[in-house]
Amino acid sequence: EIVLTQSPGTLSLSPGERATLSCRASQSVGSSFLAWYQHKPGQAPRLLIFGASSRATGIPDRFSGSGSGTDFTLTISRLEPEDFAVYFCQQYGNSPRTFGRGTKVEVK
Amino acid sequence: QVQLQQWGAGLLKPSETLSLTCAVFGGSLGGHHWTWIRQPPGKGLEWIGEVNHSGDITYNPSLKSRVTFSVDTSKTQVSLELSSVTAADTAVYYCARTSGYYRMYLDLWGHGTLVTVSP
């Protein structure tokens, strides 16, 4: 199975700063079948990015995804107060689908 | 607006069978795969498997021997059973929907159900 490694585990930033989150796959993720989700405590996870770089419906353009092959990045250009959450990546091109362990973006 | 509502027993004893149901409100089961995912405390997400409205199923090999999915199209519900549970099965269990039949990313999630396995 494809193992996804996210880094860093925790990112401490201030509102207005730029967040750069990494997701590295143990083998190539075919056709960039990689998604990013946001998860806040007590809430359902929310799809942000699919196909490595396509924003889901209603997602602000401060969220962007990039990468291919084994290296993928989620960038939040300017953190808003509501963006402090856990972010995890998922590959959905191979079975079993797998997830990264998440990056927590916390207020510095 | 389509919503997913989950329910099931939250406290089980070892060796019992976990049973969860996910109901789809405002939509149908067709055109999507319905996925079960779990997250043990302090750990990452684990994909349990997926099922479509026709009953085509893919299970995670790590759980395949103990997992059963079922579909009730008349009630727009999907269900998960996990047999012979142990403490290692303690987790928040989520149901989620793929965006489409071939768009396998998850565009809608339930809020999750905490299941605790304890003697």
Image (spheres, helix red, strand yellow):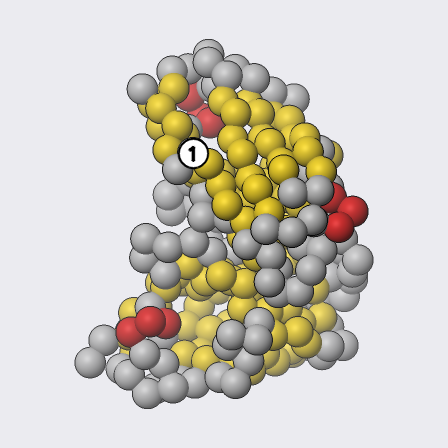
Q: Amino acid at mark 1?
A: Pro
Q: Residue at x 50, y 16 (%)?
A: A18
Q: Residues within 10 Å of mark 1 (few under 14, many from 20)?
A: some
What SS does tag 1 mark?
loop
When the figure is inspected, residue B93 is found, relative to residue A53, above or below; the finding is below
In which quadrant will I find the N terminus of chain A? bottom right
As rendered, which of B56 and A103 lies closer to the eye?
A103
Residue A13: x %, y % from top left: 38, 19
Question: From the viewer's perspective, is residue A34 above or below residue B17?
Answer: above
**Is B39 or A10 nearer to us in this picture?**
A10
Residue at 78 percent across and 60 percent down: it is: B101
Residue A99 shows up from this direction: yes
Report the residue marked by disc 1: A8
Q: Is residue B104 visible?
A: no
When asked about the image quadrant of residue B113, the answer is bottom left
* Quadrant position of residue A53: top right
Tell me where residue B35 sits by quadrant: bottom right
**Residue nearest the viewer, comparing B26 with B21:** B21
Residue B100 image position (x, y, % from top left): 76, 55
Quadrant location of the C terminus of chain A?
top left
Most foreground residue, B94 or A102: A102
Mark 1 chain:
A
Image point 41% across, 15% down: which residue?
A15
- The residue sitting at the left extreme is B119
Residue drawn at the location 57% of the way across and 75% of the way down = B61
Furthest toward the top, the residue is A16
Q: Position of residue A63 (x, y in %)?
A: 60, 26
